[in-house]
Amino acid sequence: MKPVFMTYTKKDLINLAVCMFLSVLIIPTFITTEYWYTSILIPWLCLALATIGQQIVMGYTGQLALGAAGFMAAGAFAMFNLILRVPDLGFVGSLIVSGLIAAAFGILFGLPSLKVRGIYLMVATLASQFFIIWMIDKFGWFKNYDSSGIITAQDIVILGKPFTTPLAMYFVCLAVTTVLTLLAMNMARGSTGRNWMAVRDMDIAAESMGVSLLRTKVQAFAISAFYCGVAGALFAFCYLKSLEPVAFDIKLSFKILFMCILGGLGTINGAFIGAAFILLFPVLLNAIGNNVFHGAIDATIISSIEQVIFGGLMIIFMIYEPLGMAKLWENLKVSLKSKLSSSGTKSLKSSAQKSE
Amino acid sequence: MAYERKFKIGKPILEVNNISLSFGGVKAITDTSFNVLEHEVRAIIGPNGAGKSSMLNCINGIYKPQQGTVSFRGQQIENITPNIMAQMGLSRTFQNLALFKRMSVLDNILVGRKLHTKTNFLEVALQLPKVKKEEKLNRERSEEIISFLEIEDIKDTPVGKLPYGLQKKVELGRALATDSTIILLDEPMAGMNVEEKRDMCRFILKVNDELGTTMVLIEHDMGVVMDISDRVVVLDYGKVIGDGTPDEVRSNQKVIDAYLGVEH
């Protein structure tokens, strides 16, 4: 299909319009409970953004990295300090600079990817996770010498207007996520993405075509960390509304990794699907526990069941559909279409027979 | 060959001087020298394990030979890497297929346009007008190559799903997309049936004839080699045992003994 606008085909533009219609008009009109915004929609957008970052380095460039939460912490604390110390930058400016600071860490911790690969790289990138958290804990300056351990995030003010209600914060997250997702899609579909995937699929051949492994890998790590950094800042400012290094521990990194794998490696929409699944699944289990079993099952058991099901799903997906839920969705659409068209031809045939 | 060539065979473009390569104690190549002339079709033949692929890997910078030098257009190249050679205008295909399996045929060939892509990731992310212009040119060139290789009907298929013969064609296409002055083909016809081989020969000669691209190929099929190449170098146990036109090589006793076997 020929792109109509930027890299987008007509179908993409329709999808985009539908998504925008749903998220800008339908959701704010019909969802009025604050719970949905503060506990589901806002973290979903933030984590989907971080998962796009993970997708870029892992799904597209094929570098097994584990440390997204570290870069998120870097972004979050950079944001806190920028708003505190450089107020002239404004919210949007601080957000971009926080992303860039996270990207600098991405470059630093992406360098091992030139020498090690696979599971060894995963161990090497874990260093970023621990180093960044340690650094923030160790030097009081990052926390503005706050002794309580938990710092309240500043209010979001854009162009003099406060964005403090859940709905307003939702729109901030939505705007940032939409812009960055579109940029990521442009990169993934353009020459940049082709270089990433070439490095992923066959690095020696990529190099023989003039793709520099050094530049491509480091670039992917930097962009990935930028996305994670911005996501981390939004996560802290819109969702947690506080800053504490513990929120960005290794568990969050694993969560993002799972979102990436379950959603579908090497897809952008998979980032959203994976994040939604992992966020909503515990909510669903709780609802089942409360409504079907009327609280007969203990909450701790439910959370254990959740772990078991996640583990099982990971294994099942790895074996049967390594391309994840995005691929399942794609298959479903194809099979529906073929069913529709085959029933269409059947009815045509039958009408043709009738006319005979 | 009787017909008039558009691109006359010229001066040496690639020279391999006294290359020696060993893996641990195993000598793959010993003191090997030969040259490749501009616009010619040059074949490297030899029995299994003669060091043919290792030779290509040395030229392309994947292996670092312990001794010897490679010169391109009379200029000796230090610290050869695949990337540097690609920038100098040398492209290649691989013996065991090194395609980007999850990408479509078109995307594979577009990666070959990498060195003709000057825009950076930020410009691509923002889709500036110059990115679109460049992408359009690269796509046009890739489509040209696709129709040249007669693979239009599979251009959107992921390469991993294609049969072997077609994958070999795509790999040739990717090498062509670089617009290199010299292309190294590592067994371009291995595992193909007669018809596919004939097709591949046609493409190799057509590229050489129409674009003047210098072709260096490794091949097992003696008939094919003798038909399409201007000059042949024969390796055995990592050493050159014959070098010359197909007729000269065919009548070289050493070559007959080592490779063709004694004719009965």
Image (spheres, rainbow, N blue to C red):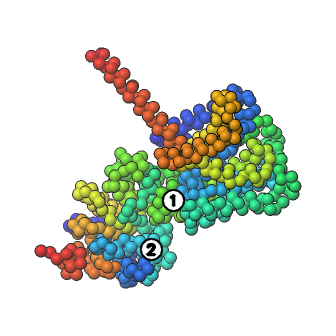
Which amino acid type corresponds to the residue marked 1 in the rendered image?
Val
- In what quadrant of the picture does the C terminus of chain A appear? top left
| Chain ID of residue with mark 2 | B
Among the 4 quarters of the image, the one containing residue B46: bottom left
| Residue located farthest toward the top when viewing the structure as drawn | A355
Q: Please give left or right for residue B134 compared with residue A146 in the image.
A: left
Read off the residue under disc 1: A199
Instruction: Give the image location of residue A204, x and y in percent.
Output: 47, 64
Instruction: Give the image location of residue B171, x and y in percent.
Output: 38, 58
| Chain ID of residue with mark 1 | A
Instruction: Give the image location of residue A26, x and y in percent.
Output: 66, 28
Q: Secondary structure at mark 1?
A: helix
Query: Distance from label 2 to label 1 (Cα)?
Result: 19 Å
Among the 4 quarters of the image, the one containing residue A237: top right
- Residue drawn at the location 87% of the way across and 54% of the way down: A146
Structural crowding at the residue carrying mark 1, measured as other residues with C-alpha within 10 Å and reported as few (<14), some (14–19) or many (≥20) = many
Q: Is residue A130 above or below residue A183?
A: below
- Residue drawn at the location 80% of the way across and 47% of the way down: A242
Q: Which mark is residue B63?
A: 2
